[in-house]
């Protein structure tokens, strides 16, 4: 007959093994639960990031220095993620929805993602001036010598000129509106297949601030509203320069 000491040892050994095994299972399941939660959070974050497609609905206003000018612009109007920070920049690329002139939001996501092929986004760039004349001032001394004299009527008083073959702009046309007492409105537009493939094939540049050049591109569907587009772009730029931002 075994002694009591041997019986105690035989009875306790399985209990110790079972307890250790249970603890290991507890730790394993705990680690699995933590890993699952981490994966879930990472997946949720990644899913939101993918859904935003590089956009942001943040309205944090950034103070950005470009040359001798300071502009204050909200994140959701800044086109590229790396540019959404305070400080100096050589260039700033923006985008806004027409006609609201607002930045990205859940409500405006279809417009910014061009759902259904709709083109209603203005692309705007700010950078130090490289030329002493803006597009309107370049019309008489430069563009006037590069276009054909004959033109065809366009929307809202615009005249559409073809560039000469020697101009280097054979795939573009020049849209011009001349009104008494004002500088001509001048805009270059892609033509043909290139215009259909581009989200905003018409481009114009103006001078703002101390030494900034602002260029904006718009879809051809807005050519008939060129006066309103020009006025709203200038008004928005003025608010950026005054430090009031724009939401």
Image: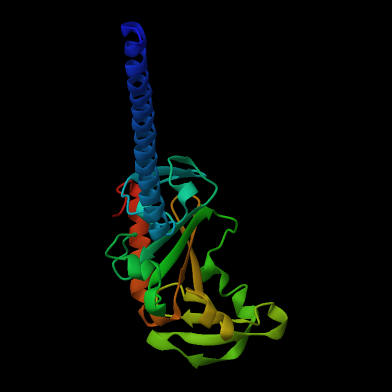
Residue, far front: 1
Q: Position of residue 236 (x, y in %)?
A: 34, 59
Q: Quadrant of residue 147?
A: bottom right
Q: Decide which of 12, 128 is in the foreground and name it.
A: 12
Q: Residue at x 36, y 47 (%)?
A: 40
Q: Decide which of 224, 12 is in the foreground and name it.
A: 12
Q: Quadrant of residue 116?
A: bottom left
Q: Is residue 212 left or right of residue 61?
A: right
Q: Position of residue 137 (x, y in %)?
A: 53, 68
Residue 73 visible to the viewer: no
Residue 205 visible to the viewer: yes
Q: Decide which of 19, 147 is in the foreground and name it.
A: 19
Q: Residue at x 57, y 75 (%)?
A: 140
Q: Is residue 198 left or right of residue 23?
A: right
Q: Position of residue 227 (x, y in %)?
A: 36, 75
Q: Is residue 141 left or right of residue 80?
A: right
Q: Quadrant of the C terminus?
A: bottom left
């Amino acid at each position: 007959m075994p002694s009591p000491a041997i019986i105690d040892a035989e009875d306790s050994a399985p209990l110790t093994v079972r307890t250790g095994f249970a603890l290991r299972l507890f730790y394993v399941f705990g680690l699995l639960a933590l890993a699952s939660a981490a994966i879930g959070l990472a997946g949720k974050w990644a899913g939101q990031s993918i859904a935003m497609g590089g956009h942001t609905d943040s309205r944090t206003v950034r103070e950005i220095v470009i040359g001798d000018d300071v502009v204050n612009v909200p994140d959701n109007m800044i086109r590229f993620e790396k540019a959404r920070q305070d400080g100096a920049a050589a260039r700033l690329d923006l985008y806004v929805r027409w006609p609201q002139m607002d930045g990205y939001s859940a409500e405006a996501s279809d417009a910014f993602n061009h759902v259904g092929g709709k083109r209603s986004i203005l692309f705007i760039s700010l950078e130090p001036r490289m030329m002493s004349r803006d597009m309107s001032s370049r019309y008489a001394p430069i563009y006037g010598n590069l276009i054909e004299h004959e033109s065809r009527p366009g929307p809202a008083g615009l005249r559409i000129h073809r560039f000469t073959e020697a101009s280097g702009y054979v795939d573009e046309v020049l849209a011009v509106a001349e009104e008494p007492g004002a500088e001509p409105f001048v805009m270059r537009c892609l033509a043909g297949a290139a215009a259909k493939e581009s989200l905003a094939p018409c481009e114009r540049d103006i001078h703002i601030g101390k030494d900034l050049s602002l260029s904006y591109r718009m879809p051809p569907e807005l050519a008939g509203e060129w006066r309103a587009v020009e006025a709203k772009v200038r008004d928005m730029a003025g608010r950026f320069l005054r430090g009031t931002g724009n939401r």
